[in-house]
């Protein structure tokens, strides 16, 4: 389990951590649980995304599908729901 693994890291350190997590993911006998608010990190690692907003499940599925969700775009990407 990783809880915001790149928080507080320099720009140079982030790729090293992301590569380490990616290598762990490649081991088919391991499951990686990642808690993260940085969508670029989520996009680079996730096979499935579960989104909670104000304590409620609002999205669960494939990354492209979840990221395209209007509530996810508004809550986490700052894109207004109406466009």
Image (cartoon, rainbow, N blue to C red):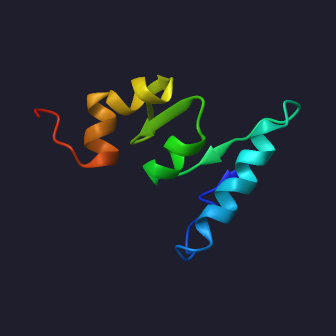
Q: Residue at x 57, y 28 (%)?
A: 48
x%, y% of residue 3?
64, 56
x%, y% of residue 10?
55, 77
Question: Based on the displayed image, in which of its 4 quarters is residue 19 positioned?
Answer: bottom right
x%, y% of residue 17?
68, 61
Q: Residue at x 78, y 35 (%)?
A: 31
Above or below, 14 against 22 in this view is below
Q: Is residue 37 left or right of residue 13?
A: left
Q: Nearer the viewer, residue 44 or 42?
A: 44
Q: Is residue 16 left or right of residue 4?
A: right
Above or below, 34 against 67 in this view is below
Q: Nearer the viewer, residue 37 or 39?
A: 39
x%, y% of residue 12?
58, 74
- Number of marks in the rendered image: 0
Q: Is residue 30 left or right of residue 5?
A: right
Toward the right, the furthest residue is 29
Q: Residue at x 54, y 51 (%)?
A: 36
Toward the left, the furthest residue is 82
Please state, as top left, top right, bottom left or bottom right, where the C terminus lies in the image.
Answer: top left
Q: Residue at x 73, y 40 (%)?
A: 32
């Amino acid at each position: 389990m990783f809880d915001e693994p790149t928080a507080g890291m320099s720009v140079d350190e982030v790729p090293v951590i992301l590569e380490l997590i990616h290598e762990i993911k490649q081991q088919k006998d391991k499951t990686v649980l990642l808690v993260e608010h940085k969508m670029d990190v989520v996009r680079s690692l996730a096979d499935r995304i579960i989104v909670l907003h104000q304590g409620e499940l609002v999205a669960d599925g494939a990354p492209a599908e979840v990221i395209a969700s209007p509530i996810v775009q508004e809550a986490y990407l700052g894109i207004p729901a109406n466009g």
